[in-house]
Image: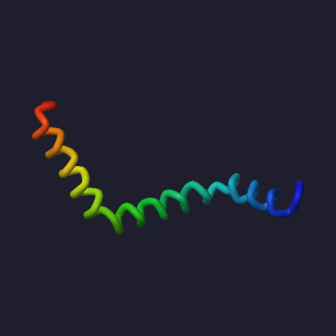
């Protein structure tokens, strides 16, 4: 197996990898939390006003 593929496989099997991915996702969600909140509120308002409830 070539060097880069072996390194990627070793990194993917590292127990720290899921933690790092979750940490990056949490930081991204925190940074765009206000946008996500208004998108959810807008979607729920549209759903309610459309008579689907």
Q: Quadrant of the N terminus?
A: bottom right
Q: Nearer the viewer, residue 16 or 11?
A: 11
Q: Quadrant of the C terminus?
A: top left
Colour convention? rainbow
Q: Residue at x 29, y 57 (%)?
A: 36
Q: How far across and down, in percent of the image, does residue 9 sit?
A: 75, 54
Spot the residue most to the bottom: 31
- Quick check: 11 left or right of 45? right
From what the image shows, is residue 42 above or below residue 35?
above
Q: Nearer the viewer, residue 42 or 20?
A: 42
From what the image shows, is residue 10 above or below residue 43?
below
Q: How far across and down, in percent of the image, does residue 10 sit?
A: 75, 57
- Quick check: 24 left or right of 17? left
Q: Residue at x 17, y 39 (%)?
A: 47
Tally of numbered tags? 0
Spot the residue most to the front: 50
Q: How far across and down, in percent of the image, does residue 19 sit?
A: 54, 58
Q: Nearer the viewer, residue 45 or 3?
A: 45
- Quick check: 51 left or right of 32? left
Q: Residue at x 14, y 46 (%)?
A: 45
Q: Residue at x 24, y 50 (%)?
A: 40
Spot the residue most to the right: 1
């Amino acid at each position: 197996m070539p060097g880069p593929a072996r390194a990627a496989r070793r990194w993917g099997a590292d127990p720290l990898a899921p933690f790092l991915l979750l940490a990056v996702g949490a930081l991204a969600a925190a940074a765009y939390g206000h946008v996500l909140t208004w998108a959810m509120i807008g979607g729920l308002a549209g759903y309610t006003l459309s008579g689907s409830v």
